[in-house]
Image: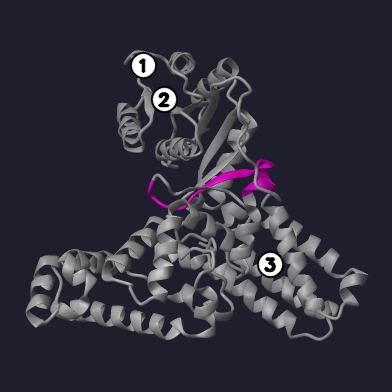
Amino acid sequence: MFETLSEKLQRVFKNLRGEGKLSEQHLDEALREIRVALLEADVNFKVVKQFTDAVRSKALGQEVMQSLSPGQQVVKIVRDELIEMLGGTNVRLNFAAQPPTVIMLVGLQGSGKTTTSGKVAKWLQKGGHRPMLVSVDVYRPAARDQLKVIAKDVGVNIWEGHADDKPLQLCQDAAREARNTAHDVVVIDTAGRLHIDEALMNELREIKDNIHPNEILFVADAMLGQDAVKSAQEFHQKLGFNGFILTKMDGDARGGAALSIKQVTGQPVKFVGTGEKYEALELFHPDRLVSRIMGMGDILSLIEKAEEVVDKKKAAELQEKMLSDNFTLDDFRDQLKQIRKMGALDQILAMLPSIGPFKDLQKVKVDEKELVRVEAIINSMTPKERRNHQLINGSRRKRIAKGSGTSVQQVNQLLKQYAQTRKMMKGMKNSFFGKRLKGMKLPEMPF
C-alpha cells in the first residue's frame, strides 16, 4: 500500500545521508519533499503540518547539527515521529475480568464489518479463546446469513436468535448464552448504513448503554482515505469507540487513512486486515509499519508468520537432508506448502528490507498460479519418481505433463530448477558455512 511513499522517503533519506554537514537549507528541502510525499499519500494536511513542524524542531537541535552523521540523525527523528503519529506502541484488546468479553464492531455499510467479525473470531480462537458471533443487522437478512456462513467456515459458534428479535435482545441473549456455554468472548456484528444517520446512532447507543461492551471497534476501509477518517470522526463524536480495525491494507490505495486516523481521532489502530482470508488479520504494530515504509523491512512479523506455520521438527530434518544431498521432490513440495501457508508471497517479500541483498526482491512479481502448477506437477509423479528424479525420462515427462495439466516444457523447467538447487546444496556441504551449519540447532528463521 505504501510503495510510492516508501520510494520517495528513501530517496530523500539517501540525499540527506550524502551530506557531510546538515544545514537549514538541506533540512528545508528534505522536509518539503517529505511534505509533498505525505500529502500525495492522502495523509490529512493538518497531520502533515504537525509532523513536519515536529521533525524540523528536533532536527535543528544542537545535538543533531553538531553530529558527525546529521543525515542519519534526521532519519531517526523522522522514523520516531512517524511511529508517534501512528500511536507509538501497539494497543491490545481489553478483556473483561469476568467473561464474557463483549467486542462490538461498528462502521458504515461496505467497510467489511461482517467479514472482519469472522477474522476477529478466528484471531481470538488462535489465541486460545472461545468466541461466539452474533449479527444484529435485522434490516438485511442476507448479512445475517453471511455471518452464519462465516461462522461455519472459521469453526466458531453463532447466536442466531429469532427472526423478530430486536438488536438489543439479540445482544442480551447472546451474552447470556455465552456465559451458559463457557464462551469467553462475544463478537457483535452491528448494522451499517451507507451514511451516518440518527436512527443508526440511537440503536448503537442503546446497545452500548445496556450491554457495556469492553471494546467498540470502528471498522474502516483503508482504501477510502480521508473519507474513512471523516466518517470515523463523526462516529466517535456521536457514539465513542476504543479503536480501529483498518481493512484492505493490502490494496493499492495511498494509505493516508492509516497514517492520519490516530492523530485526527485520538483513538489507536488495533488491527489491520491484510487480505481476504480469515487468517489475514494482524495486530497493528506502528514501529513495524514505519520500518516497512522506510525500507527497513519487517523481519519480526515475517518470523512470527513463519513460526505459526513451520513445523520445527520437519525443518530440522529438511536442513539435514539438504546438507547430506538427500533433498527430494517430496521435500521441495512440502517446503512450497509451508511457504504458501504464510500468506501471499508478494506480502512476504514486502517484509524484507529494500537494502543490501534484498534490495531487488520487493520488485519481483510473483505469480501464485506458478506455485500451484509446480505442486500439481510434483503430485503427478509417482512416489518412486519423486524420490529419484533421474528416473523421469521423456515418456514419463509426457505423462506427468498430461496428469498435471501442464506442458512438457514446464515439467522440464521444474526439474532443471530442482537439479540446480540440489547442486547448490551439494556445493555448500563442504564449504565453511555448510560445516558450521551441520549439527547446529535450527534457528527460528522464516525458511
- Residue 235 x %, y %: 58, 34
Characterize the local packing of mark 3: few (<14), some (14-19) or many (20 or more) Cα atoms within 10 angstroms: some
Question: Which comes sooner in the sequence, label 2 or label 1?
Answer: 2
335 relative to 249 in the view: left or right:
left
Q: Amino acid at mark 2?
A: Val
For image coordinates 34% across by 64% down, the residue present is 336
Which residue lies under the disc numbered 2?
134
Q: Position of residue 396 (x, y in %)?
A: 10, 76
Between 199 and 185, the one nearer to me in the picture: 185
Of 436 and 15, the residue lying toward us? 436
- Residue 122: where, in percent of width, then height? 43, 38
Q: Which residues are magenta?
A: 261-277
**Secondary structure at numbered mark 2:** strand
In reply to whether residue 268 is colored magenta, the answer given is yes
Residue placed under numbered mark 1 in the picture? 161
* Residue 49, picture quadrant: bottom right
Badge 1 crowding class, 10 Å Cα cut-off, few under 14, some 14 to 19, many 20 or more, is: some
Q: Residues within 10 Å of mark 2 (few under 14, many from 20)?
A: many
Q: CA distance from mark 2 to mark 3?
A: 44 Å
At horizontal 52% and vertical 29% (from top left) the residue drawn is 104
* Residue 35 marker: 3
Identified at 49% across, 51% down, the residue is 224
Give the mark nearer the N terminus: 2 vs 3.
3
Work out how far the residue at label 1 is from the one at label 3, CA to CA, in angstroms: 52 Å
**Of discs 2 and 3, which sits in the foreground?**
2
The reply to whether callout 2 and callout 1 are in contact (CB within 8 Å) is yes
Which of the two discs, 1 and 3, labels the residue nearer the N terminus?
A: 3
Q: Are marks 2 and 3 in contact (CB under 8 Å)?
A: no
